[in-house]
Image (cartoon, helix red, strand yellow):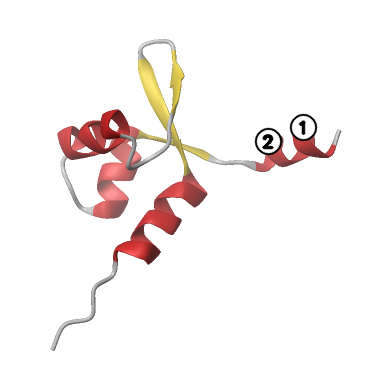
Amino acid sequence: MSSERQLAEVRFLTVAEVAAIMRVSKMTVYRMVHSGELPAVRVGRSFRVPEDAVHEYLKTSFIETA
């Protein structure tokens, strides 16, 4: 029951929404999904990406510059 509740609380984003958040093209998001860099669920012919996965990817992708 708790896993069902957790899944119900997950917010899924469209590829266009992910692209807007990350400020990249939709094609870049599709490449990330297909390569496995970004987890996604296929719904019909489209993909949905968990919002937490996007934020986690961005957190781990920051690079300190000089």
Picture coordinates of residue 57, whole percent (x, y)? 37, 55
26 horizontally vs 4: left or right: left
Q: In this view, does 28 lie above or below 59?
A: above
Q: Which residue is drawn at 26% across and 44% down?
A: 19
Crowding at mark 1 (Cα within 10 Å: few <14, some 14-19, many 20+):
few
Q: Which residue lies furthest to the right in this view?
A: 1
Read off the residue under disc 1.
Answer: 4
Q: In this view, does 58 lie above or below 36?
A: below
Q: Nearer the viewer, residue 16 or 57?
A: 57
- In percent of width and height, residue 24 lies at 18, 48
User: What kind of residue is marked 1?
Assistant: Glu
User: Helix, strand or loop at disc 1?
Assistant: helix
- Which residue is pictured at 61% across the width and 41% down the height? 10
> Residue lying furthest top in this view?
44
Where does label 2 land, which residue?
7
How busy is the neighbourhood of tag 2: few (under 14 within 10 Å), some, or many (20 plus)?
A: few
